Amino acid sequence: MLGDLLKKVSLVTALCFVSVATWILPLWAADTSEARFTYVSLTAEQLQDDLDSSSLRQAIEQSRLYYKGRPGQQMLPVCDGQVTVADMDDAMAQLLLCLQERGGDGLAGYLLENFDFCQAGPMLVTGYYEPLLQGSLQPTPMFTSPIYGVPTGALRQASRRQIEEEGLLQGQEVVYLSNALDAFFVHVQGSALVKLPDGSVRRLHYAADNGRAYNSIGKILIEQGKMARDDVSLATIKAYLAEHPWEVTPLLQQNERYIFFSLSLPLPPLSLSGPPGAVGQSLVAGRSVALDAKQYASGGLGWLQSSLPAGGEPRGLTRLVANHDRGSAIKGARRLDLFVGQGDGAGKVAGEMNETGRFFFMVPKRKVVIRPLRK
């Protein structure tokens, strides 16, 4: 399943992602009430990371790059208090040194010795990914669906129907995809890798949107009696639209939100890292998450306990993750979106991911935590 449009960010390199698990149907209403965090005690057995240490080091390095661009005395929200950027960065530098010296061995003991853990209760854990699609810089009989750059003036507020039916943005195409459904999924995901006929690969970046409301496709199909709530998933949505092609355009146009993109230069071979998230750094598959930045410090670390879809019974997920992203559908202290990677395999995982989990934000010990004044 996919989700409500995730985010609008001011960074030029930032993206607008949508959780694959929630664009189809909001399954858990956003909890925007004031968070009630509690500090908890974890054990070494609970802090066994199920991913490789190299990806963890990469995630921490991305967070540190973000912090290097922030004032050292800037305050970051940590549970019921605040901590400085300098203190958070120092804690990450020490953790990175531990990983470089020991690898994954001794990680649990180090975390228990140097961090406190707090949580806000059960959390909905969904997933998102970056598609890999075929495309062309010029329209061809195979590639007919345009992706547009950012328009100027009043055109930027036009609805999806107006843009598609009136040809308002003709001449501002940045790339063409094979069909309208692929183009719509790129709008929902906010980013995509596009392989061109010459074999080069470029990245579509979220650049802006028209500011109009997002309307869930799955919700519409359920309300129309065309799908049962329990049957809604990415696969069933695609199958339904493939069997009812005449419904694609009118159905998609009920979502007025429209996304505008920029297109990168060709990406060097073997350097297809994750797309940049809201902190301006590349997302790390399996490690980067989207959280509400008002509740959790951007760039901060946390321990995630949940599960991953595995075709049958879900398999356990327990790992350290980094807050590298955010989004308009990720509101409150009990929503988390995990970036699961790129391409069709990642899309399948993200499309099935709709899990209950626990997330423990990590607060550096022995740091000055300034408690905010309460009204």
Image (tube, rainbow, N blue to C red):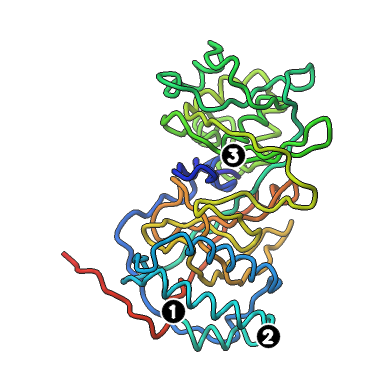
Circle 1: element type: strand
Furthest-top residue in view?
A: 166
Q: Residue at x 68, y 31 (%)?
A: 182
Which residue is most to the right? 198
Q: Amino acid at mark 3?
A: His
- Residue 88 figure quarter: bottom left
Query: Closer to the N terminus: mark 3 or mark 1?
Result: 3
Foreground pick, 317 / 85: 85
- Residue 333's x, y, as percent? 40, 61
Q: CA distance from mark 3 to mark 1?
A: 34 Å
Question: Where residue 111 appears, x then y in whole percent?
Answer: 53, 83
Q: CA distance from mark 1 to mark 2?
A: 20 Å
- Say which mark, if any, is on residue 364: 1
Label for residue 102? 2
Are there few (<14), some (14-19), or many (20+) residues within 10 Å of tag 2?
few
Q: Residues within 10 Å of mark 3 (few under 14, many from 20)?
A: many
**Which amino acid is tagged 1?**
Pro
User: Of the numbered discs in the image, which one, if any, rests on residue 86?
Assistant: none
Using the image, determine if residue 44 lies above or below residue 375.
below
Locate the C terminus and report the quarter of the image it occupies: bottom left
The residue shown at (75%, 26%) is: 136
Q: Amino acid at mark 2?
A: Arg
Left or right: 323 with respect to 232? left
Q: Earlier in the sequence, mark 2 or mark 3?
A: 2
User: Spatial distance from mark 2 to mark 3, Cα to Cα?
Assistant: 37 Å
Which sits in the foreground, 121 or 347? 347
**323, 97: nearer the viewer:** 97
Relative image position of residue 12 (x, y in whole percent):
51, 42
Q: Which mark is residue 205?
A: 3
- Quarter of the image containing the N terminus? top right
Residue 63, position as x, y percentages in the image: 53, 64
At x 41% / y 52%, what residue is drawn? 331
